Amino acid sequence: MTPPTHAELARVVRDHAGQLAASLVHLVGDFGAAEDLVQDAVEAALRHWPVEGIPARPDGWLYTVARRRGLDVLRREDRYREKLALVPWPAPPRPDDRLRLVFTCCHPALPRAAQVALTLRVVCGLTTGQIAKAFLVPESTVAQRITRAKRKIGEAGIPYRIPAADDLAGRLAEVLAVIYLLFNEGYLSSGGEQVRSRDLADDAEFLAALLHQLMPAEAEVAGLLALIRLHRAREAARFGPDGGIVTLAEQDRSRWDHDAIAAAGRLIARAAALRRPGPYQLQAAIVACHAEAPRWAETDWTQIVVLYDMLLHLAPSPVAHLHRAIALRYVAGPAAALSEVDGLGAALDGYHLFHATRAELLRELGRADQARTADERALTLTANPAEQTILRQRLNWA
Amino acid sequence: MKYVLMFVETEQFAADLATLDEPERERAYARVQQWFADNHERITHHAYLLPPDSATTVRLDRGEPMVTDGPYVEGKEIISGYVEVEVADLDEALRLAKSWPACPVVEIRPIAA
């Protein structure tokens, strides 16, 4: 037997842990107790499977462990024990249950860090240790967040159900924010070199796909899924052989996954047909403009500026404004772009990309000294080694 | 489940209320009355408190009980009243709080079973 890779283990656990959690919450009727059983089963799987191989029916394996453990742990809790003993197997699939799970984990009465940790543990089957490693925080911190969140779910009466129609939009936005945060954590801030036992970008894509499958009529869910897939379709070209970031202009576009890009484009079109535009769909459309351009020089900047205008209308933010200014440079020139960027100084003075963008525009306008000052400021503001390398190169050569 | 919804007034809210003319103030009170009427089946108890300048605080952790004039924290946000409600879960309590037509902050706390 070849031992399963980290990625295979992660994928199998992810495919089944949430399902198991959903079934157990339904059976036991107590979110916290069910969640403990899933965590125990996942930890057992991660001890056994690397040695014994992944079983033919991982869902059955996990369920058997959880059930045995449940009968043991809940010995004094007659009502859970009886329920668990009566459970037929395989448990009939109840698609709504995983949706309830997601909405409970991402309830707005829980702090964001707890929403993230709970979703990863309950829906994606991460262990507390894996979450701690992914976010570079002590394991005890994650454990406390989870314990506190589960206590609050029980004590404050956070329900285990899909929100009512009049609440759904706001609650869904909360879930999407959690998934997007996971994606950013896993994808945009990754250094490209280290192999982790869990790739949060995989988990984010899994969650977005799950949500899209369960809520196909929600346009923003489709938008977020397309956005994630478009970014990931260009993953192979993002880092050079030395681990450094390769800028979009310089990426080898033949290494992009063009089938995935086309599929994401179709997903955006289907979402657009629902006629409920939103920030994720617009961001996906912007990334699609880049991904569909055969060469950097053929990028449709006019369209990108229009999409940023729509995005700023729906969800105004200084960072989106900065990105619009970057696109504007290719439509109206560096002077016009710089005057837009300079207007954002008050909001973005602490943001490295604000200063890095100013530096590029100033250099293009022949104002080299000011450009250096801006690059130096950017360098003091980022801790990301790959970005620091780019800025240092500019300071040395430009 | 039982919850207490604590209504929190801010200085800004009190100032805004003071500038209302008589008909506006009556309409504001009518909205609160309507809220109570709409939710009377869920409300098990409620009270409106007099302003914090009427408060007296007793501290018991400093040897002899210490009595002082005023609320226990000097803050810009003060509890001005509360309702006790009986609802299915936090989502229902949240819906009540979100529809509250008066002061700008509501804290929801479950009552210990």
Image (tube, rainbow, N blue to C red):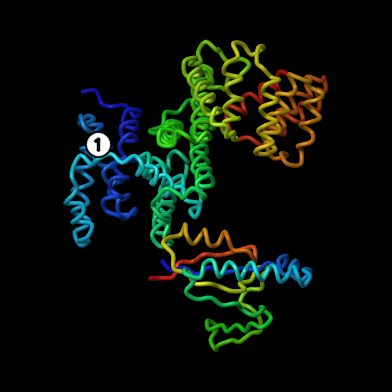
Residue drawn where x is 34% and y is 54% of the image: A32
Quarter residue A90 falls in: top left
Spot occupied by residue A377 in the image (x, y as percentages of width and height):
72, 34
For this rendering, which residue is in front, A263 or B59?
A263
Check the residue under mark 1 and report the chain it is in.
Answer: A
Residue drawn where x is 33% and y is 34% of the image: A15
Q: Is residue B101 above or below residue A44?
A: below
Left or right position of A64 against B94: left
Left or right position of B26 against A177: right
Spot occupied by residue A6 in the image (x, y as percentages of width and height):
34, 29
For this rendering, which residue is in front, A277 or A105?
A277
Q: Which residue is mark 1?
A: A59
Spot occupied by residue B36 in the image (x, y as percentages of width and height):
56, 70
Residue ranking furthest to the bottom: B64
Near mark 1 (Cα within 10 A), the count class, few <14, some 14-19 or many ≥20, is some
Q: Is residue B69 above or below residue A326?
A: below
Secondary element type, mark 1:
helix
Spot occupied by residue A233 in the image (x, y as percentages of width and height):
49, 21
Residue drawn where x is 61% and y is 78% of the image: B49
From this viewpoint, is residue A379 visible? no
Residue drawn where x is 41% and y is 44% of the image: A102
From this viewpoint, is residue A76 visible? yes
Report the label total: 1
